Amino acid sequence: MSVSPPGHMLQKTRSRSHPGAQLWSPSDCCPGVSREIARASGHPDASQDTPGTPSPSFRQVQATSAPELWTQKQLELKVAELVQFLLIKDQRKIPIKQSGIMKHVVRDYKNIFPDLLKLAAERLHYVFGYKLVELDPKSNAYILINALEPVGKDGELRGYQRTPTTGLLMIILGLILMNGHSIPENDVWCFLRRLGVYPTKKHSVFGYPKKLITEDFVKQRYLEYRRIPHTDPVDCELQWGPRANLETSKMKVLKFVAKIHNQDPKDWPTQYCEALADEQRRVRPEPNGPALTS
Amino acid sequence: MSKEKCSLTGGKEKRGELVRSLAWQHLVKQEEEEAVKKEEKEEGEDEEEEGSDSSSDDPNPEPPCMHPDLLELVVDREKCRKIRRQYRQLIYTVQQNREDIVNTASDTLSEALEEANVLFDGVSRTREAALDAQFLVLASDLGKEKAKQLNTDMNFFNPIAFCDLLLLFVGFNWVEEECKEFSDCDDSIVLSFWGMLHEEATSWMLQAETFHFIFGSFKAERSARKPRLGCHKRACKMEGSGDMPTKLRRLDVHANQETTEKEVERILGLLQTYFQKYPDTPVSYFEFVIDPNSFSRTVENIFYVSFIIRDGFARIRLDQDRLPILEPTNVSQVDDESDSYSYCRKQGVISLSLQDWKNIVSTFEISEAMIKNSY
């Protein structure tokens, strides 16, 4: 599959003041932008603009507001910087906030932020095999998920790069699924005690398990941790978080549980029906190529 | 149910108002007696009652002489009887189809409840209401059973079994035999278990692998702290000013050297000189440290001597009068256990007030300080 580099996706215009310099303006991605600026500055020919041609209004933008115009190289560097920022931020698996991206990377490029993000998403997809996903529409937070299905014996190739917490997470997600939509925290600890994981004891692998489950997994948005109303003493429950729904599915977790039991997922009719319904909700026609999904 | 009944005895009251004359009362009494007999017969034989009631659906025409109010009363009673019969029929049907109703896929219970709802609209007397209550008890009992049936799918999942199967899946089924608890196992076994489980779990998750720097991140070397020029300038200014006392100015020249270290070395030199002159005579601790002219210098001397003792260049012992004396340390000459014991490093805290200092100076008749001022 031949993929044109992000540079080809941008329209190039030549500046009269710097012959040969490739410039990029917001109008290339958002054709209405340059016209708006020109109209605001009271240019007479603003209404007759056509994007892509070096028209008076485009020159007006060039002349009046220098930060509105960037060379191809500047843009490439900014996209590369954004990709690097996203990769480094993802190491802790905590959702990357839009405000953080704006503050540390975008800065003066605020007006073309959506386009930068789109280009970064494309690069992450084609180079690294990652999908940049918005966690939920209101949160303005992003996560990276694997765009490629896991390969068998993949773990052997990778080796352990960090604490093997995915097994513990999968067990908890399985318990929640098999219990309904949520599970009391006490029930989780009753189960984990049998595997030598205690809420108060430091574990040789996980460190402090209570912190890992009720803080780290919650911050990473794998789990939701909330108080059960009208309970005395206070009791809390665990539910699936939005990240868990993006990185795995009810059907996959049910299949994992079934594999452990050496049974068929259909042996649990209620959960199987729920998982099927979840699968049907997921099956939506996706647009071609990588895009920010929410 | 669907309608609220204000009074279930409304029929009787109505009848009391309608029937006024004795003649009518007599007729009504006869009718009532017949009805009671018929009701007893119905309750005794449900099956027979069904057959006989089919004819009662079309009641015999009343004699033409009957009063219209009485006619209305008879029709009302027939209606109530019909409702009771339908209730009994409904209860019987529900009991017969119990298994079908309890089945999770069946809607029979909902249909039966809707039917009872319709019947309840016509209920006006206690007897019919009692049958409705009887049906409600039956329906709620069946509803409870149906709910249990719905939950059994969930109950198939046994967390304890799941836990044991996890150990079995990873191939750690022998753990229970060797260790009482999984937490008692060796750390390598625990790590291996969670590692294998992690490997299995990652194949079910689209988790993005984290990228790390190939040779680690670039380590920024700490930049050397810039010397603060402010202090230096201030020192130069002070040196230039003629108001400053001579002693302090002379000390300030060597401000960058460690004063304490210098003083300790100087006092150690004095002590060693004394030990060389009088090798067999230990020096009195108080005579050595106390300056009869300055309490503050005395305190300073005690401080400096403590370093000499700490570093093992001298030691403090109590003489026969139980007064502290300073001796040179020579480990090779140590023979007895008491001496070797005294070599163990110990700490002591002494308090010295101004009055104590004066008392020591007068008692020991100290006229001159052994440790002379360095400035």
Image: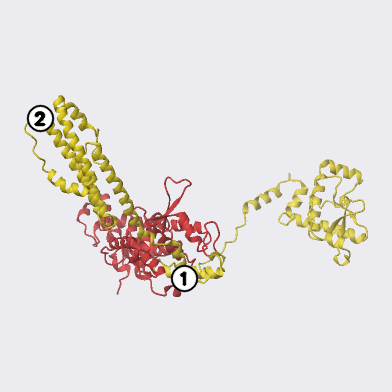
State the image coordinates of residue B315 (x, y, percent, origin top left).
84, 58
Chain identity for the colour yellow used in the image: B
Do the numbered discs 1 and 2 sit on residues whose CB atoms are within 8 Å? no
Task: Report, in whole angstroms, how far the alpha carbon at label 1 lies from the one at label 2.
Answer: 88 Å
B239 sits left or right of B68 in the view:
right
Given the image, on which type of amino acid does mark 1 rest? Leu
For residue A111, which quarter of the picture?
bottom left
Depth order, front residue of B284/B121: B121
Image mark count: 2
Depth order, front residue of B108/A86: B108
The residue wearing badge 1 is B168
What crowding class fits label 2: few (fewer than 14 Cα within 10 Å), some (14-19), or many (20 or more)? few
What residue is shown at x 49% (from left), y 71% (from top)?
A: B173
For residue A170, above or below residue B83: below
What residue is shown at x 73% (from left), y 44% (from top)?
A: B243
* The colour assigned to chain A within the rendered structure: red
- Mark yes or no: residue B120 visible: no
Element marked by disc 2: loop
The residue wearing badge 2 is B67
